[in-house]
Image (cartoon, rainbow, N blue to C red):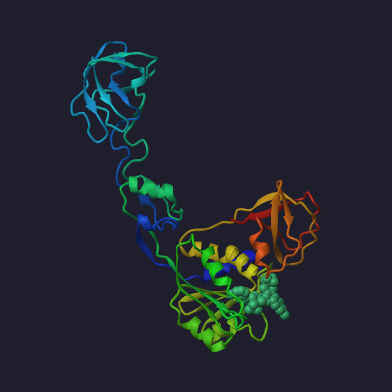
Amino acid sequence: MIAIDEALARLIALAPPIAREEAPLARAAGRWLADDVMALRTQPAHDLSAMDGYALRFADLDASLTVIGESAAGRPFPGRVEPGQAVRIFTGAAVPAGADTVLVQEEAAIDGTVLRLAGEGPGRAGRHIRRAGLDFHAGDTIVRTGERIGAARIGLAALAGLATLPVRRPVRVALFGTGDEIGAGPDALPDSNTPMLAAALRDLPVEIVARAVLPDDLHAIAAALGDTPADLIVTTGGASVGDHDLVRPAIEAAGGRIDFWKIAMRPGKPMLAGRIGDAMIVGLPGNPVAAFVTTHRFVRPLLAAMSGGSLALSPRRLPLGAPLPANDRRADHLRGVIRDDRVFPAPTQDSSMLATLAASDCLILRAPFAPTAPAGESVEILDLA
Ligand SMILES: Nc1nc2c(c(=O)[nH]1)N[C@H]1C(S)=C(S)[C@@H](COP(=O)(O)OP(=O)(O)OC[C@H]3O[C@@H](n4cnc5c(N)ncnc54)[C@H](O)[C@@H]3O)O[C@H]1N2
Ligand code: MOO
């Protein structure tokens, strides 16, 4: 059995390279940048008013001014503001030449074209003006390699004049359940693992190229693993030591190789990983909770790394609501419920129990050989969304 950190490092080392592409902004969200990106324009492109009011010279504030025209967003005033003059201006409009300050309209008294200060005034020259380049300049690096593309970065890229962003292409993922017991008949066990895994990967840049349940048949599994054009093949079940646990021999029968088998964790111990041709394969245990936990600890971070980014777990600490026994050599992931800022381990931790998992708020992380923990002791948890 290898440790969790070593397993993740070996998975990432096994991953095939994923090619780059330029993704239109509408398809870039949720992906990671494959390169630094520079702004193609300066924002704002000109000095703009931040308020509705009057553009004028600060030195003229106490005088009676003549309003000589208007500057609206997209329709700038073409002339120049000379001493004794002002221009009606609106939010987002270019500040006309000659003006250095905007007086908000709430502090202006206007009579025809005659303007007077009717309040405290802007206080200093330059007030209520957004300078050209306040946000960024053309040529500035606005987003960097490895950063994840969220809504704000999509907006920023659009504002910076970009129509596409450099990313890795989506990772082609094949999901295979295994087991003769799984199917659709009245006596069959419904497949919970492939729909659960597909849902767990929904926010990642993946293309599910195959999803099926394979029988406990060496040749059928080997054929599916060898024939599927994927970057990552994820199987569930058939990873343990029973006579019908055929994923390891099937990888070898398909000409692949196993890199590791068995991780010092619970649930999830029998997980394995290897390569078949250009694809990598991760064999998750069949027990549904084991498949869920290994997906979150390994498959999601692996896919992030293949996509040019990273997905770190964000554990936090809470006091236990009930005591826990000492742990053995496997890092444990106990299903828990949070009440009144305390975490209560579920009374039964069997890795087949999806109702318990679905009712849980978090996984309680127990290090190998963690000693007995009394109620009130602080433990590390991973929140479940
Ligand atoms: N002698 C030993 N037996 C077992 C060991 C061991 O070390 N020595 N490890 C146990 C652990 S830990 C786990 S986890 C399981 C995992 O075994 P497999 O990966 O071979 O999984 P299966 O035997 O195929 O299935 C386990 C369980 O899960 C159900 N299952 C499988 N696939 C699905 C699916 N797609 N949807 C719903 N349910 C599924 C399956 O029917 C079994 O009940 O091995 C222990 N045994
Ligand atoms: O991975 Mo198994 O679920 O530890 O029981």
Look at the picture and state if 110 lies above or below 51. Answer: above
Residue at 49% across, 82% down? 224
Q: Quick check: can you spot residue 29?
A: yes
Left or right: where 66 falls relative to 18:
left
Name the foreground residue: 373 vs 180: 180
Quarter location, residue 85: top left
Camera sees residue 104: no
Residue furthest to the front: 186
Percent across and percent down for residue 199 are 52, 64
- Residue ranking furthest to the left: 79
| Left or right side of 249 for 323 | right
Residue 302 % position (x, y):
53, 65
Is residue 313 depicted above or below 267 in this figure? above
Q: Dividing the image into 4 quarters, which one contains the N terminus? A: bottom right
Q: Is residue 332 above or below residue 280?
A: above
Q: Hey, which quadrant is residue 263 in on the image?
A: bottom right
Among the 4 quarters of the image, the one containing residue 213: bottom right
Q: Quadrant of ligand 2?
A: bottom right
* Residue at 34%, 48% in the rendered image: 158
Residue 60, x across and y down, in percent: 28, 14
Residue found at x 66% / y 58% = 360
Image quarter hosting the C terminus? bottom right
Q: Residue at x 64, y 85 (%)?
A: 244
Locate residue 23 relative to residue 304 in the image: left or right: left
Closer-to-camera residue (142/211): 211
Locate residue 378, reporting x and y percent. Answer: 74, 50
